[in-house]
Amino acid sequence: MDKDKKNADVKSVDYAKWGYIFIAPFFIAFFVFQFIPLVSTIYYSFFEYYRVGLKIVGPTPVGLANYQALFMSDFPKYMGNTIILWILGFVPQIIISLLLAAWFTDVRLKIRGKQFFKVVIYMPNLIMASAFAMLFFALFSANGPVNGFLVSAGILEEPFRFLNNIAGTRGLVALMNFLMWFGNTTILLMAAVMGINPSLFEAAELDGCTPTQTFFKITLPMIRPILVYVLITSMIGGLQMFDVPQILTNGKGTPDRSVTTILMFLNNHLFSKNYGMAGAISVILFIICAILCIGVYFSLNNDENMKLFRKRGKRVQEQRMKKGGR
């Protein structure tokens, strides 16, 4: 018996130890490159800490002064710019992506070359934002091919200066964001639609449902988790919009700072070495993103949470009934 116990101890392997060893690199990298910068950013947001020439002022504790100065500055305007640009780019994106996902997954349409169209739709997502912005800058400049075509076709009498017009500049930024990301959204929604049980569509067809009724009564409710995911990730990406308007307007956000986003505002403070204000902007962005992530969690697990609450409620009622019976 003693020998069997010794052999069992020798053969046993501590798998938990190896699990901790394998996940240790991730936590070390997270702690060094993400957690420490996050804590230092929050810490310096409560300090006056900036550079004037070669002189460094601070760090001096100022409490919530940076946050008060932030909301008294043009930060609300830049927040509004970011929301407007996101809406202009996302609303057409979700509409077109839903239509394409519904068409490509409908067996009755018998669309040929689906794989080819999927590749073509996704290709703009592979282009760097900087290259996309430079391309649009060349296309829509006063002497660009777009204005040349509009003038030669008689649609315009003189070139339209897109980059000197608020609506034109915002429209270009929204169009670029739409073209860059609608392919990714379409692929996600197509995967969600293809995951629906085909028998549901067959039953709806037998019951005489029209394609519109099937789409709104079956397709949309069944892909709700993916829709919520797309919405929240798009909102987070919209809050972090930087490269397209930065390159298109040469970092100025002109005209009249109408396309200056929150991250461009943050970059200006980092460039001027105002670490206190930059930290305050970063903290506000972090709080907004955290709220959105919590919203994603509860939205995606809403049905499961309701089931758990109902089960717990039944258990409590059963326990009360038992106690009352006793």
Image (tube, grey):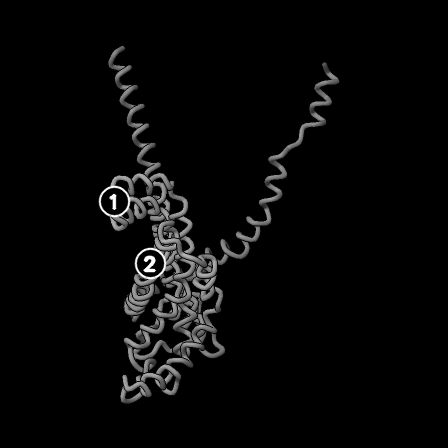
Quadrant in which the C terminus appears: top left
- Quarter-of-image position of residue 111: bottom left
| Residue 174, position as x, y percentages in the image | 34, 69
How many marks can you see?
Answer: 2
Q: Which residue is rendered at x = 70% and y = 19% of the image?
A: 5
Up/down of 13 relative to 115, above or below:
above
- Quarter-of-image position of residue 268: bottom left
- The residue lying furthest to the top in this view is 326
The front one of 36 and 49 is: 36
Neighbourhood count class around disc 1 (C-alpha, 10 Å): few under 14, some 14–19, many 20 upward:
some
- Give the residue at mark 1: 209
Up/down of 4 relative to 24, above or below:
above
Between the residue at mark 2 and the residue at mark 1, the CA separation in whole angstroms equals 24 Å
Q: Which residue is rendered at x = 35% and y = 47% of the image?
A: 223
Up/down of 85 relative to 296, above or below:
below
Quadrant in which the N terminus appears: top right
Q: Is residue 11 left or right of residue 174?
A: right
Q: Which residue type does callout 2 highlight?
A: Ile
Mark 2 or mark 1: whose residue is earlier in sequence: 2
Q: Is residue 38 left or right of residue 85?
A: right
| Residue 139, position as x, y percentages in the image | 40, 80
- Give the residue at mark 2: 94
The front one of 73 and 238 is: 238
| Residue 250, position as x, y percentages in the image | 41, 79
Q: Which residue type does callout 1 highlight?
A: Cys
